Image (cartoon, helix red, strand yellow):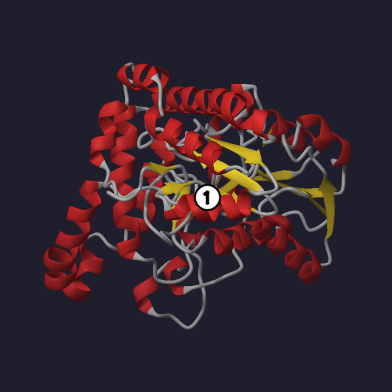
Amino acid sequence: MTDNRSSTLDANDPLAGYRDRFFRADDVRAYLDGNSLGRPTKASAERLSSFVTEEWGTQLIRGWDDGWYELPLTVGDEIGAVTLGAASGQVFIGDSTTVILYKLIRAAIDARPDRNDIIVDTDNFPTDRFILQGIAAECGKTLRWVTPDPDAGVTPEQVAEVLGPDTALVVLSHVAYRSGYLADAQAITALAHEAGALVLWDLCHSVGSVPVQLDAWGVDLAAGCTYKYLNGGPGSPAFGYVRTEHQEAFRQPIQGWMGTSEPFTMGPEYEPHHGIRRFLSGTPSVIGMLAIQDMLAIVAEAGMDAIRAKSERLTAFAIDLVDDLLIPRGVALSSPRDPSRRGSHVTVDHESFAEVNARLWAKGIIPDFRRPHGLRLGLSPLTTSFEELEIGVEAIAAELP
């Protein structure tokens, strides 16, 4: 049974009113997986419906001349301005995160042909590690591994130990997908640049929940998905960031018609477009970009600073609940206690969580299970209430053996 802690926190939450702008399923009592898939906005339901009847259905192919062609860049600029601290002309949208990571990593190492090493950490998201292993084998490069504390993340000191004159690229996640550790992106980027290396940040678990300042930090490249805190829907297209100074010098490896200087000329040779458009490849998903725009409008209205403040309050309350209800039952906290080093999710571990999670889902309590025995409490600041969080942690405690 919840107590008045969550009620007081909800009553004093300046962002509480935003929850009404999102769909809520009647059979879901606590949704604690917003860091895997965000709730849909009500505005997106209207936008998607009207798109079928008023744009796709009436414009048909003419829609490409009436805004669709520019969407990967206009939505990219919105993502950059609202969530990334990026000036216009540096963010594009299209492809999956996996494909964009491949394109940007290959472009970066090709731009440093005399350097052999790529730095990555052992606890990075599997896709990032798998892509890098494939590229290293393909291009004859060497991966230099950082091994962070699995309950924390990569520190500047750890990166400094493996940086050297042969480092071409550093690839790290801003927020660790498992522990929620928030890396010091500015300090690590500066260290890499001192060594003459480039840096690519995976922003999948930070964009929309943690303020990011790519331009100010001097970041070279970044990539991230849009279906978590940007609520674009299952499989909504990812974004890529390429700093202006690199765009003309970098050659992206997946040369498709949408990245050419004259896409509709259908010329015999590939000629890259100037600027960020050259990093597009194939035809982008127009439908996949629609819902992102509605969430970006909400994020811009609420403000990233307010969203970050709510995130810190949510994760702090989550840790209080974990300390009170779960740790006495043998659960371990696997996320940083320092809020300045924590993203918007909290991970706890217990050997029974695989079975517990299945029972929770059946009861409308939805955290995120991560093998071998972790539960992530993904707290989306604009959609998660303190009461919902408390209900969820109490349900976890009730299911423990």
- In the displayed structure, 355 sits above or below 323; it is below
- Nearest the eye: 209 or 397: 397
Residue 185 appears in the figure: no
- Residue displayed at 49% across by 30% down: 211
Extreme front residue here? 401
Q: How many marks are shown on the rendered structure?
A: 1
Q: Position of residue 133 (x, y in %)?
A: 76, 63
The type of residue carrying mark 1 is Gly
Q: Is residue 383 above or below residue 369?
A: above
Left or right: 203, with 153 as reference point: left
How far across and down, in percent of the image, does residue 227 sit? 43, 52
Q: Position of residue 293 (x, y in %)?
A: 30, 48
Q: Quadrant of the C terminus?
A: top right
Out of 330 and 271, give the one closest to the viewer.
Answer: 330
Specify few, some or many for label 1: CA neighbours under 10 Å numbering under 14, 14-19, or 20 or more: many
Q: Which residue is identified by label 1? A: 224
Quarter occupied by the N terminus: top left
As helix, strand or loop, the secondary structure at mark 1 comes to strand
**Within the image, what quadrant is residue 110 found in?**
bottom right
Task: Tell which residue pokes out farthest to the bottom in this image.
Answer: 268
Q: What percent of the width, then of the height, locates residue 201?
A: 62, 44
> Residue drawn 78% across and 58% down?
113
Question: Which residue is at 52% across, 39% downward?
Answer: 398
Q: Examine the rendering and report whether any part of residue 323 can be seen.
A: yes
Q: Is residue 287 above or below residue 6?
A: below
